[in-house]
Image (cartoon, rainbow, N blue to C red):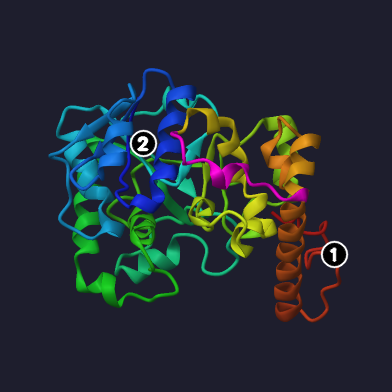
Amino acid sequence: MDFLTFEDREQDLPALILLAVSLGRNCPGSRLHLPARNLGSTALDWLGRQPNVVLHQDLWAEDTFWNIKPYLLEQMLARDIRRITWLDADLMVTADLSGYFRYLSDDTILVAQEGFRSRHAGTGGRTIAIGQPIARELGYTVNSCVVSVTARHQPLLERWKSLLRSDLYQTADPRFITGDQDVLGGLLGGTDFAQVPVTPLQTGRDIAHDMLPGDFGLFQRLATLRNGEPRFVHAQGRKTWRYTPGSPEALSLLSQLSLHRQWAKAHSADMPPGQTAWISNDGALARTMLRLLPRNPSLRGLPIGMIGSALNLAYIIRNKLRRNPTFHVGQMPDGGPPASPT
């Protein structure tokens, strides 16, 4: 399996290291490709000694940091790699990933689902925002933290690039288009690419977005007792490795029980000296949860999940009441059971 990422900011080296070591541990034989032109000496020294990391001095993109994915994916496909999978550098892998790729056809693109978003979810609004007719609604918002493609997707990558360079991208409706993933989702819902099979990583089961409390809610966390931990953990919001140990940001509940931070503990011995203080500086609650649940990182964050699910449920109820003043808590408008929060 071939994976691709990009990160050259010194402050985010801990996240890049964790992606590399978690892939090396859980996906032996896989390769993590990385543009190395602007990497600092510390990063080059450590990454250059990792057997699963391939550094590329000639791999680069003409566009800005946030829009480089289609450029780099194209360049890797041009090197005769059958399937290349982009991973954001703030991801961590918790288990073997081969099952996700074993049965994918060359025509199929693999993407991630966004976390819980009640407003402007899905692909339809994004398809319209990039000026395309709607041919299908995927039913979820695409998150481009994981994008897996083959040479069959070259036309899609080309169109993705051209739209990211266009004036339309700069002026599109900001409710639907705020980044490269919105353009990709819009294209996959439009007439030109509606025939492309899409396999999503399901949010909360396959991938946990560590952003808003409701992105990985109470019931999703409890479901890990049956389904196992999500195989991808995405530090989409808080970058806990950036916080000064002991600072208010580092000691907040969301930081201390961050799923990404909890999983990082499993790799602290593999990280270079001086890169682990942010992992080990636990407050009283984090220490208690770690003692109670040493093998269940998702369950250590149950307090966050409870808050998130309560907020999600309140949001759902508020919207139902606004649309239907006769709606009562505990009953859906169609007489069915109550809505289940994320």
User: Which SS class for mark 2?
Assistant: loop
Residue visible at 14% across and 34% down? 78
Q: Given contact means CB atoms under 8 Å apart, are the residues at marks 1 and 2 in contact? A: no
Residue visible at 44% across and 63% down? 124
Quadrant assignment, res 82: top left
Q: Residue 153 location in percent, x, y?
A: 25, 41
Residue visible at 56% across and 38% down? 264
- Give above or below for 342 relative to 4: below
Query: Which residue has dot 2 on it?
Result: 108
Amino acid carrying mark 2 in the image: Thr
Asked whether residue 202 is in view, the answer is no
Query: Which residue has dot 1 on it?
Result: 331
- Give above or below for 93 relative to 156: above
Q: CA distance from mark 1 to mark 2?
A: 39 Å
The residue closer to the viewer here, 270 or 162, is: 270
Asked if residue 297 lies in the magenta stretch, the reply is: no
The residue closer to the viewer here, 271 or 16, is: 271
Q: Does label 1 or label 2 sit earlier along the sequence? A: 2
Quadrant assignment, res 31: top left
Is disc 2 surrounded by few (<14), some (14 to 19) or many (20+) residues within 10 Å? some
Range of the magenta residues? 272-284
The residue sitting at the top extreme is 29
Q: Residue 221 location in percent, x, y?
A: 71, 43
- Give above or below for 323 relative to 279: below
Q: Quadrant of the C terminus?
A: bottom right
